[in-house]
């Protein structure tokens, strides 16, 4: 008959200590990650989705159009989306590639980052829910 491997009391105590220390380290890592988190999630029903017309890029000091090869340059077209939930709504600026398949009246989860410039939300992912 094979002899069973039994842990000594010291080995058992060491194993339990290692398990507790791992749990503490995991919680500290989770807290550290949360402290450096700058993201958002916003879910709701899409009330409006409007495509912008590309605007000319203007030099802030001269107030003149910025030219490239003698031609005016333009900002990329974007979508202005309004998402509503629980009696409130929020407007988002959505890049062209993310907003092209959005349907008014459908439920979505918008996810992204809070960027430091003017505390704006930058949508990076849209999921239909």
Image (tube, rainbow, N blue to C red):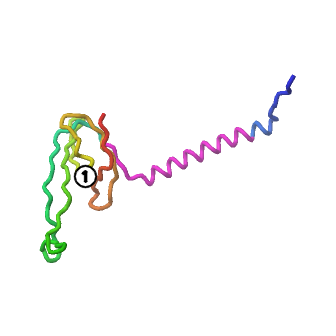
Please tell me which residue is depicted at 18% across the width and 37% down the height of the picture.
104
The image position of residue 38, as x and y in percent, is 38, 53
The region drawn magenta spans 14-41
Residue 26 belongs to magenta span: yes
Residue 105 in the image: above or below residue 96: above
- Judged from this view, the residue extending furthest toward the bottom is 62
- Quarter-of-image position of residue 63: bottom left
Please tell me which residue is depicted at 81% across the width and 31% down the height of the picture.
6
Q: Is 103 placed left or right of 25 in the picture?
A: left
Residue 36 belongs to magenta span: yes
For the N terminus, the quadrant is: top right
Q: Mark 1 packing: few (<14 Cα in 10 Å), some, or many (20+)?
A: some
User: Overall secondary structure of the magenta stretch?
Assistant: helix
Q: Nearest the camera: 57 or 90? A: 57
- Judged from this view, the residue extending furthest toward the front is 69
Residue behind mark 1: 95
The image position of residue 4, as x and y in percent, is 82, 27
């Amino acid at each position: 008959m094979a002899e069973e491997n039994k842990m000594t009391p010291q080995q058992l105590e060491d194993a339990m200590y290692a398990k507790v220390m791992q749990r503490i380290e995991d919680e500290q890592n989770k807290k550290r990650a949360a402290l450096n988190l700058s993201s958002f999630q916003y879910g709701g029903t899409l009330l409006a989705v409007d495509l912008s017309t590309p605007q000319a890029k203007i030099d802030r000091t001269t107030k003149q159009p910025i030219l490239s090869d003698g031609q005016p340059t333009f900002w990329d077209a974007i979508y202005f989306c309004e998402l509503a939930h629980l009696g409130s709504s929020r407007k988002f600026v959505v890049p062209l590639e993310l907003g092209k398949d959005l349907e008014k009246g459908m439920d979505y989860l918008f996810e992204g980052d809070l960027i430091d410039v003017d505390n704006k939300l930058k949508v990076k992912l849209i999921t239909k829910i």
